[in-house]
């Protein structure tokens, strides 16, 4: 996937002294169920990348929703003066979770935002959550403080801008796309596509724009604390 790495890095639009934000629209149109290490040097293997879930009511695939939000976030951040790298700008790609992290690493991104949506067997469950590594992560635990702060700010400001329920920051070392990171990283789960109210809202451009603005607001606050 060297070609994909170069193509993604080529999308960087340089502005002097601007913060670099990498955005990953989670999943892709066709899953790659071959496996890769869950972390550098690990013997534990996971699927490289899956299709994700699908809107129970909207019928929109998660990979499409993630991309729609990511593209709006890209524009919002560029409008605010950030340099932005997109791990993908279409659904017809094959980029593993480890490779997505390596895109952010190679660019020395100041923050890596991974956009996903949730699903649950409980149709009433709704809300947003963010995900980062634990402080004891053997691969990038030194980045825990920054990743956790990034996760907190993104969750706080995105829920405030959308009136979505705020769930919590989940700390886990099971995510390939986090374990391979050598830059501050968070996954935002923007809502439950299994919940009727939330799924139908997520399908609208207006709500997607609110999410993008909330994420950007969270990044602004994060860089006020970790901007040096």
Image (spheres, rainbow, N blue to C red):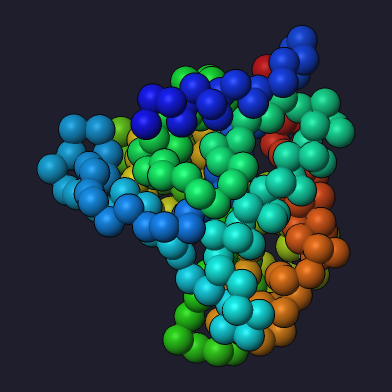
Q: Which quarter of the rendering shows the C terminus?
A: top right
- Which residue corresponds to the image point at 43% horizontal and 53% vertical from the top-left? 171
Would you say 93 lies left or right of 167 here? left
Q: Residue furthest bottom?
A: 123
Choose top left, top right, bottom left or bottom right for residue 2: top left
Residue closest to the eye, 137 or 206: 206
- Which residue corresponds to the image point at 37% horizontal and 43% vertical from the top-left? 96
Residue closest to the eye, 15 or 54: 54
- In this picture, is 105 found above or below 64? above
Would you say 163 lies left or right of 144 here? right
Q: Is residue 174 visible?
A: no
Tell me where residue 107 appears, x and y as whole percent: 54, 20
Q: Residue furthest front?
A: 92
Choose top left, top right, bottom left or bottom right for residue 168: bottom right
Choose top left, top right, bottom left or bottom right for residue 137: top left
- In this picture, is 161 found above or below 6? below
Tell me where residue 132 appears, x and y as whole percent: 47, 48
Q: Please state the total of marks drawn on the protein image.
A: 0
- In this picture, is 117 found above or below 81? below
Q: Is residue 58 visible?
A: yes
Residue closest to the eye, 160 or 100: 100
Would you say 176 lies left or right of 107 here? left
Tell me where residue 62 appears, x and y as whole percent: 55, 65
- Which residue corresponds to the image point at 72% horizontal and 20% vertical from the top-left? 13
- In this picture, is 25 found above or below 64? above
Would you say 13 lies left or right of 104 here? right
Tell me where residue 202 appears, x and y as whole percent: 71, 70
């Amino acid at each position: 996937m060297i070609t994909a790495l170069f193509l993604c890095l080529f999308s960087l639009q340089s502005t002097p002294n601007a913060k670099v934000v990498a955005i990953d629209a989670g999943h892709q149109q066709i899953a790659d169920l071959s496996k890769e290490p869950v972390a550098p040097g690990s013997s534990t293997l996971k699927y490289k990348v899956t299709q994700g879930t699908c809107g129970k009511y909207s019928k929109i695939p998660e990979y499409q929703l993630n991309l729609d939000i990511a593209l709006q976030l890209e524009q919002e951040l560029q409008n605010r003066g950030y340099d932005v790298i997109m791990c993908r700008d279409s659904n017809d790609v094959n980029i593993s979770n480890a490779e997505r992290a390596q895109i952010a690493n190679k660019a020395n991104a100041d923050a890596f935002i991974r956009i996903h949506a949730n699903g649950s067997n409980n149709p009433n469950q709704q809300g947003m959550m963010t995900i980062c590594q634990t402080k004891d992560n053997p691969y990038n635990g030194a980045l825990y403080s920054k990743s956790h702060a990034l996760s907190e700010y993104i969750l706080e400001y995105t829920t405030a801008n959308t009136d979505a329920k705020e769930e919590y920051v989940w700390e886990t070392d099971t995510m390939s796309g986090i374990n391979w990171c050598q830059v501050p990283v968070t996954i935002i789960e923007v809502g439950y596509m299994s919940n009727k109210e939330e799924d139908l809202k997520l399908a609208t451009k207006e709500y997607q724009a609110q999410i993008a603005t909330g994420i950007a607001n969270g990044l602004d606050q994060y860089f006020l604390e970790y901007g040096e």
